[in-house]
Image (cartoon, helix red, strand yellow):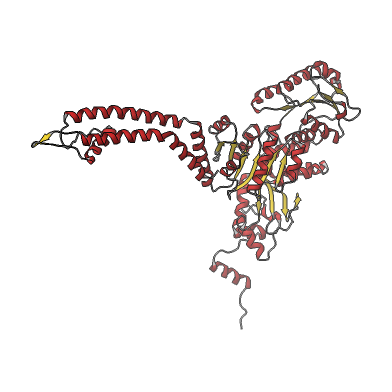
Amino acid sequence: MTPTSDLDRVTMIVLRYMRRPLFVLLFVYSVGILGMALMPGRIVDGETTRMTLFHAFYFFTYTATTTGFGELPNGFSEEQRLWTIFCLYTGVIAWFYAIGSLIHLVQNPHFIQAMDGFRFARKVKGNAEPFVILCGFGDAGSLLARGLSDHRMRAVILDADPERIKALGVRDYTVPMPGLHADASVPKHLLAAGVEHPACRALVALTNDDDVNVKIAVMARHLNPRLRVICRSTSARHEANLRALDNVTVVDPFEIFAQLVSWAIARPALHNLNAWFVGARGVELGVPVQAPRGNWILCGYGRMGSWIHRHLRAHGLEVRIIDPEVEADQIDEGTLIVRAHADHAALTSAAIEDAAGVIAATSGDGDNLSTLLSVTELNPRAFRIVRQNRHENQVAFDAARADLVLQHSLTTARRILKLLISPLVQSLIDWLADRDPAETRALVVRLKAALGEAPPHLWSVRLLPEEAPAVIDHLAAGKGLALGALCVDARAYPARLPCEALAVHRNGASTMLPASTLSLRAGDEVLFCGTPEAESMLRATLHNPYTLDFVVTGEEAPRGYLFAWLDARRRRGPRPRP
C-alpha cells in the first residue's frame, strides 16, 4: 500500500458518501439563485427592478454562511421575500442532509481504516531513523517493543487486532512507534510499514499463527531480499521451510524456554549470565539460582514439555512425566509416566517425596499455579520451576513465590532483542554453552571486576568510516591498533573504562572473548559490555584522532600546525654548530 493508493482510497470513499449531499446542496442553491434573479423586485422610477445573477449569488453566499450583513442592492419585494423564505427552508434541509452524511462518513469503518493507513504510511515514509517492523503485538510483541524502546530503537507495528493498536497509543515509549490495524501477511501492508524503506533494519514476525508468520517471512523476502527477517515458529515443517530461505532467523519459543530451564538446572552460572545480559528482574551477576540435580518431575508433555524433556535428558537428568495424554512410545524406555493431571494423587504416584524439583509446564496458568500449591504441600523442599503463559497473570505468579518463573513470551522477546541489538550476544552465550563451565565463571569474574554492581549495557561498534573515522584513518596510516587500547580511559590514562570486549566478528567468523592484544582491522565488529558512560567515552575515541592517538601512545599529540612544527623541532634537537 503506497501513500498514493491510500489517498486515492480516502478520496474515493469521500466522493462515494458525499457525492449525493453535494449535488443536493448545489441543486438547491442553483435553483435559489436562479429563482431570485427571476423574481420581480421593487418598482423604481416606474420600472420593475431585478437582481443580477451576481447579486443573487452574493445574497445566498452571506445567507448560507449566516453572516447576515444585510447589505442589499435594493429592498425586497413581496415576491422576493416569499422566494427567500422558500430557499431558506430548503437550504436548511439540504444542510442537515449534508452534515448528517458527513457525520456518517467520519464514523464509517472503511473511511477510518483508510485514513489510519494514509497517516501511518506518511509517518513511516517521513522517518529517517533506523527502525524494525514488528508484525504481531501480543505478549511477546509488546514485551519486545518495550525492550526496543529501552534501547531507543524505533519500531513500526502491525497487528490484526484493533484493540491492541488502540492500546499502543497509551504506551509511554521513549521513541515513536506508529501502529496500524492490518493483516501483516498482505503485501500492501508490509509496503506501508516500510519493508522497502532504506532505514528499515529488520522484520520480526511474531503472530501466534505459524502459518501467518511463514507467509509474512516469504512476502518480506520477495519484497526486499536484503532485509533481515526474524520469524517465530513452533512447527518443525515450517521451520524447515524457513531455514531454507536466505537471511531468515527462526526463533522457536518452546526450544528457548526448554533451553533456559535446562541451563537453570545444569548450567546455573550460564543461566545467570544470560539473565543478567537481558536485564531480568532481580538477577545479580554471580549469584545463580541453586537448582538441585537429581530426579525431576515434569508436569505437561506438549510441544514445550517434549523440548524440556529432551534438554534435561541431554544433561543426564532423570525425569518423571505427568500428563494425561502422553504416549509411552514418545518417551525413552524406563521413564516413569503418570497419565493424569498434575494433582495430589498424580504427584504422589510420581514419588514427589524424593523429587529434587518440579517443572509445571502446561499451557494453562491455572493448572501450573495449582500444581505449585500441591508441590508445596507434599514436598516443600522441592525446587519449583513454573511456566507463565500470559503476561497479564504476572501478579499471581509473583504471589506464588516459585523458585524460578519463566514466561515464554518474555524469553522469546529477550532472545529476539539480543539478535536485534547484536547477534554476537547470543553467539557468545551459545559458545559458552559448548565450553567448560569454568570459562563462564571466569567471564563473570571479569565482568564483575570491570562493572562492579552496575547493570549491563551491551553495544557493538563497526570499524567503518561512518562509525569509527579516527580508527579508519589510524589503520590507513599503517599504524597498528590493539583491542585493549580502545578500552583505555583518556581522562585517566592508563586506567580502563568500565567495559569488556566480548567478541570480534571479522570476515564471517567470530572470535569470542578476544585477548586485549588482538590487532583490529577495518570492517571488524566488536561487541562490548559496559556502562552507558563507557560507551560515550569509547565512541569519542573512535571519532577523535587526538584521543585515539593518546590512548594508543600515552602521549598527547600537538594540535595545530605551529605546535606540530615546534614539537617536530623539539624532537630533532638543537642544530649542531658549524
Residue situated in front as seen by the camera: 496 or 182: 182
Please tell me which residue is depicted at 48% across the width and 31% down the height of the picture.
Answer: 108
Image height check: is 334 above or below 430?
A: above
Q: Position of residue 337 (x, y in %)?
A: 86, 23
In-image side of 492 versus 377 (left or right): left
Image height check: is 405 above or below 57?
A: above
Q: How many marks?
A: 0
Q: Position of residue 555 (x, y in %)?
A: 63, 61
Q: Residue furthest right?
A: 334
Image height check: is 265 above or below 204?
A: above
Residue situated in front as seen by the camera: 81 or 429: 81
Q: Residue furthest bottom?
A: 578
Residue 278: tell me if it is visible: no
Quarter of the rendering occupied by the N terminus:
top right
Q: Position of residue 284 (x, y in %)?
A: 71, 35
Rendering quarter of residue 330: top right
In-image side of 24 versus 494 (left or right): left
Q: Position of residue 6 (x, y in %)?
A: 51, 41
Quarter of the rendering occupied by the C terminus:
bottom right
Residue situated in front as seen by the camera: 189 or 171: 189
In-image side of 24 versus 478 (left or right): left
Residue situated in front as seen by the camera: 511 or 323: 323
Rendering quarter of residue 234: top right
Residue 75: tell me if it is visible: yes
Image height check: is 441 above or below 330?
A: below
Please tell me which residue is depicted at 82% across the width and 18% down the height of the picture.
Answer: 346
